[in-house]
Structures are given as structure tokens and as C-alpha cells.
Amino acid sequence: MHPSHPSRAPRSAAALLLLFLITTMTTLGLSACGSTADRHADSPQFRDGAFHNPVPPKTVGWREAPRLIWRFLFDKPAEAAPATPLPVAQISREQLLAAPDRSLVRLGHSTVLLKLDGAFWLTDPVFSERASPVQWAGPKRFHAPPIAIEDLPPIQGVVLSHDHYDHLDKAAILQLADKVRWFVAPLGVGDLLVEWGVDPAKVRQLDWWQSTTVEGIRLVATPAQHFSGRSLLRSNPTLWASWVIGAGDFRVFFSGDTGYFDGFKAIGEKYGPFDVTMIECGAYDRQWSGVHMQPEETLQAHLDLRGRRLMPVHNGTFDLALHDWHDPFTRIAALASAREVALLTPRIGEPLDLQATTATAAWWAPAPALTQAD
């Protein structure tokens, strides 16, 4: 054994605590100090050196933070992470290329691969083992991605919702840079990509309600109620957004991260109905309900949007909250059944044809049962 260094343990503990704060604040909504460049100062969402929600959402204040951090560190539920491996379906490039148009594969958390008009679109690609600024600590994946980045077919576009580590994976972006034709992002997030080395000619960044068309696919950045930042020193330096993705008469909604707010009704009235809504349902708690929805609110958002089928995302990959890992699936399945909402709960890696009547299994339960989505 090597002799211990008298200051190493305190320094290590301090580093781990700092890392914990950085990664956890992306879930809790802890406010930080600092400012950002004002290159997007003409945005209605930008003032006083940062982006803002129209109405300040309920988040965790610094007075509440110590007790909450204690719970995260020492009082997690027994089933915060799966006790056994999840039933991930491995998928190949050949299977993706052969998949029908208007289909999708969920790759984990909020990473979804869509096939529209014969081309592939990827939302919030996170492929690293940890949703963290480093790979030696931080929230660790429950499962490996069902396909490696190098095995993916060429990607027409990547759609990004915001800059948090469980949605914007720098290593994945750099690995995807030569494989992806376009990156579409909210204001400021595109600047990050360029700083990391992505070709500026590939990057389009939008404010809320702005749209762009790429090879016949229309993308609209729509409002969300969240926050941004990748360190404790910069508060809301980039914008967050939800997305409307349209291919002809086929429409998909992707929520990114958001609390429940009246914007869903406005989006539904302007761009609905949607063939499928991919809405966050996970990493929630009453204490930070302003920036992450409860399952009841996820269902209501789907109804506000006038969605046909609901696929809950932001779950099943990382332990980011204080609920059991399977709680989002169990709760949203019960709620959807009670309201007769068609629910899609594919296994990670399981391809779904969105033009067909689709039965997906309750794979998170001890004895999976089929749920019908039509």
C-alpha cells in the first residue's frame, strides 16, 4: 500500500462535491451567478446578460439545497437504479437503413433516432457512459447505447434542446461532427458547437417561434420552461427549447426538458395535432416541478398539444432524481390507460413504425404486458 497523502482525501472529497453540484444542478434548477456574452441580446428571452423564462419557474433555492444534496448522497431509494440489466435491443446500421419511413428508435434518455423522408434525425445525442463533465464520476448509464456512433448511418440533422450534460454530450458531438449534415439548436447552443470545432456552416440556431427547413423537413424552435448552464459560474448562458419537427403532413413534437406551462396549448393550437409527442417524464420532484414535469403534467401536455400517441422520454438511462428508476413508466402507463391515451413505451433499441398500429411491452415491469397504441 502507498502511504496516504494528508491533503489528498479532503481535496478528493471537495472535487467530488463540486462535480456533484455541477451535474445535479442540471436536474434541480439551482440558480448560479455569472453572465454570458450578449451576442443574442436582440432575443426577447435575453436580458441582463442571460436568458429567462417569461415566468420564473419553481426551482430549488440555495437554502433548500443542503438538505436536498444530503438526500441525493445518502438517502436515495433502493430502486433508484435497476438491480438487473435492462432488456436493451441491439440494432444495426442495416436494420436502420431497412426501416420504414416515419419510424423511430429510442437510443436512451432523450436520444431518439427518427427516419423522415428517407433520412435520419437525432435528438439530444448522449452516448457517453456518464452525463457529466468528466467520465470518472457523475450519473452513470443503466445500459450501453444499442448502437455505437460509428455504426450509425449518415445523419441528416441533430436537433438539440439545451446545453445540460444529459442532453448535450461534447464527446458525442465531436464524434458525430463528420457524420452529421446539420446541427439545429437554440440560441447560444450553436455557439458552443462551433467553439468545440463543429463547422459553422453546419450549424443553425433559432429563437423561440423561429423555423428553418432542411431538405424538406421543417423545424420550429418552440418555448419550454427550463434553464441552462454547464458550470456553477454561468447562469442561463444559452436558450432552451422544445421542437416541432414536420415531414409533409407528419408532425412530431420533442419537449426537451421543461416544466408544465401554458405554452403547450399555444404550440398545440399553432402546430398541432401531432402524430407523436416525445415528452419528458423522469427526473421529477415536487421541489423542482417548475423545470421538470410530474407524470400527470406530462399527460396533460400531450393533451394540450393535441397529440395522437405519447412516447415518454428522459427516463430509463440515468439516475437523476429521488424516485425509483421505473416510476416514470409505471405512473404514465396508468395515467394514459385511465385517459385512453395511446402510449408508446418501446424498449431501448426497439424500432417503431409510427405509421402502424403499434403494441409495446411494459418491459420495466416484472411480467411485461402489451400496451396498444393506435
Image: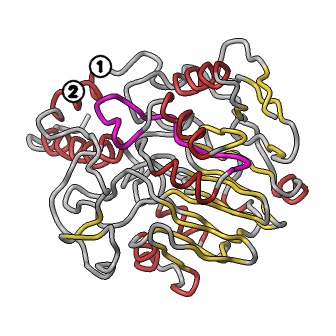
**Structural crowding at the residue carrying mark 1, measured as other residues with C-alpha within 10 Å and reported as few (<14), some (14–19) or many (≥20):** few
Left or right, residue 76 beside residue 343:
left
- Examine the image and state in which quarter residue 148 appears: bottom right
103 to 244, vertically: above or below:
above
Q: In which quarter of the image is the C terminus?
A: top right
Residue receiving disc 1: 75
Return the disc, 1 or 2, that comes first in the chain's sequence.
2
Residue 205 percent across, percent down from the top left: 49, 75
Region rendered in magenta: 273-292
Q: How many marks?
A: 2
Q: Residue 191 carries which label?
A: none
The residue lying at 14 percent from left, 40 percent from top is: 62
- Asked if the stretch drawn in magenta spans residue 282, the answer is yes
The residue lying at 50 percent from left, 28 percent from top is: 296
Residue receiving disc 2: 70
Q: Nearer the viewer, residue 157 or 149?
A: 157
Residue 372 percent across, percent down from the top left: 80, 27
Q: What element carries label 1?
A: loop
The residue lying at 79 percent from left, 66 percent from top is: 248
